[in-house]
Image (tube, helix red, strand yellow):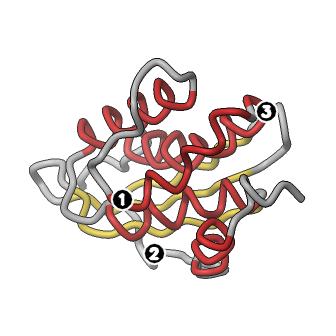
Amino acid sequence: MDSALYNRDILRLASALEAGDRLQNPDGTAESRSPICGSRIAADVNLKDNGVIAEIALRANACALGQASAAILRLNAVGVDMASIANIRDDIEMALKKQRDMPQAWHDLAILTPAREYPSRHAAILLPYDALLAAAEHIKPAS
């Protein structure tokens, strides 16, 4: 295990993600899978009328980096609109590709910076965001 990549902070966050996290009646649900590493993240989301996240739940079958990324998202997403989530996701991707600094929207994102050197891990880090965005796209129409 590479200690620069799988450091104490990554492992702490990865272990903080609640196993089997679900919402009882989500507005939208989706699962995203990385064909590169096989990691899977499932997301449930409830949105307020203005598109702001009211609740999320994330279930991860992923490496420690994917789980840590999911934990960061889970800790910070409530109260954020989906457009901002999409922007943060894109900013993380650009940072992983060394095209800009890691976004400062949430303090813990800096913990993911060492993963820049491991392109095979980038998809796992982005997976929670992809799952959440897909869940929002699958919102059930109001009856």
Residue at position x 24%, y 67% from top? 54
User: Which of label 2 and label 3 is nearer to you?
Assistant: 3
- The numbered mark at residue 23 is 2
- The numbered mark at residue 120 is 3
Q: Is residue 15 above or below residue 133?
A: below
**In the picture provided, is 49 more to the left or to the right than 91?**
left
Three-letter amino acid code at the position of disc 2: Leu
Instruction: Say which residue label 1 marks.
Output: 27
Number of residues whose C-alpha sits closer than 10 Å to that of mark 2, classed few (under 14), some (14–19) or many (20 or more): some
**In the picture provided, is 55 more to the left or to the right than 9?**
left
Mark closest to the chain's N terminus, 2 or 3: 2
Residue at position x 32%, y 60% from top? 77
Position of the N terminus, as image quadrant, is: bottom right
Number of residues whose C-alpha sits closer than 10 Å to that of mark 1, classed few (under 14), some (14–19) or many (20 or more): many
**Given contact means CB atoms under 8 Å apart, are the residues at marks 3 and 1 in contact?**
no
Residue that sits furthest to the front in the current view: 4
Percent x, y of residue 30: 56, 49
Residue at position x 51%, y 29% from top? 93
Percent x, y of residue 49: 12, 54
**Given contact means CB atoms under 8 Å apart, are the residues at marks 1 and 2 in contact?**
no
Three-letter amino acid code at the position of disc 3: Ser
**In the picture provided, is 108 more to the left or to the right than 11?**
left
Label 3: element kind = helix
